Image: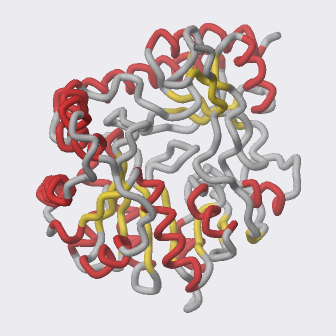
Amino acid sequence: MGYRLTRRSLFSASASTVAVGLAGCASTSPAASAEAIGAFPLDPQSASLFGPEPGLSLLSRNENPYGPASSALEMISASAKKGAYYTNDEATKTLAAMIAERHGVAPEQVVITTGSGEALSALALIYGPKGPIVAPRLFWDTTALYAAKLGMAEIIRIPLTEDMDIDLAGIDAAITPETGMVQLCNPNNPTGIATPGSVIRAAVAKMAEKTTVVVDEAYIELVDDEASMTCVPLIKQGKNVIVTRTFSKIYGMAGIRVGYTISSAETAAAIRSTLMSWTPCTSIAAAIGCYNDTGFLDYSKSKIVEGRQMVTQTLDQLGLSYLKSQTNFVYFQSGLPANDLQKAMAAENISIRGQYMDYTPWSRVSMGKLDDVEKFCKALPRLIKA
């Protein structure tokens, strides 16, 4: 069958936002327009009904093509045979208990969601009406814009530093009694930069004295030292902090859709009351099956790191600038406008991301299978000299 799907954003992006300056980047469009569109434009390349077309090197969506783990697939197969029935609440509680045990919190502090996107959307709907969402200028803003499009949130964006880091001091200074919440992403997307735990924990603890702070840790399992970087310890200290996580990245389950939040029990109850869907039984079963599959997690991380090293070595050989990443993608400057490089790569059947907002020089490439990463590395030198 000739079915094809065009890649779309999870949520359409349109909102009124506060225009701010931009550090270390040439602007080719008005800031207000860029911020209304958001950091994550539509991916113009198409894919087959499930996954990429044969021959397409899909390096644009931060997926882990080495998943799902066999431990997840076995559970999916078993649970699919019971797909006539709604997801058993005991299954959801089982997964929540597993997560709670690992992080040293109570099960009632964990909320299971349909990907962390649902959790972040719910949080934007809860806190957006209370006041502006303060965030870095460049972050995974799709869910905040979801609430903004509904007229339920305003986003105040704080410029990045000259080094493209999150300006934590600037964000803290922007908090007022009217602030609804702060939203951070660590490691950040699309920059890939991970803020050290000692730095982000101190900053978040200070912010949490004034407002709710949400820390999106979608890529945290890929950092060098997860235990030292996560903000979950702040929740255990009673701070007004919410951490979101996902099975979409290291676990290779982007299409299966499981995520979760960790917060106080009171906040968790509020999140549950705002959720918009039920997570399928197959998704819950997959997550239970692979959550503690350390063999798969170690394998996936090693492959992702190997691919990332291939990319950075290529960039070093070409003398190109890039940001130090602890994720499964690299943000770099090729010397070409990002959209031009994206089009040139597309002609080679390689999919990378185009321009984010008005960060014209910066491109992002994700780590796919090593053969696909190698294809990108071989094409880049030729395309930037064409």
Q: Specify the quadrant of the image occupied by residue 5.
A: top right
Q: Residue at x 46, y 25 (%)?
A: 308
Question: Where residue 84 appears, x then y in whole percent?
Answer: 28, 43
Q: Residue at x 41, y 66 (%)?
A: 275
* Outermost front residue: 84
Drawn side of residue 342 relative to residue 119, left or right? right
Question: Where residue 160 appears, x then y in whole percent?
Answer: 64, 58
Question: Where residue 262 appears, x then y in whole percent?
Answer: 29, 65
Drawn side of residue 289 relative to residue 277, left or right? left
Drawn side of residue 127 relative to residue 349, left or right? left
* Outermost bottom residue: 177
Location of the C terminus by quadrant is top right
Q: Specify the quadrant of the image occupied by residue 58.
A: top right
Q: Residue at x 58, y 66 (%)?
A: 135
Total numbered badges shown on the rendered structure: 0
For this rendering, which residue is in front, 319 or 178?
A: 178
Question: Where residue 243 appears, x then y in whole percent?
Answer: 36, 63
Vertical placement of 307 versus 147: above or below? above
For this rendering, which residue is in front, 151 or 225?
A: 151
Residue 156 visible: no
Residue 220 visible: yes
Location of the N terminus by quadrant is top right
Q: Residue at x 53, y 76 (%)?
A: 172
Way the structure is coloured: secondary structure
For this rendering, which residue is in front, 177 or 174?
A: 177
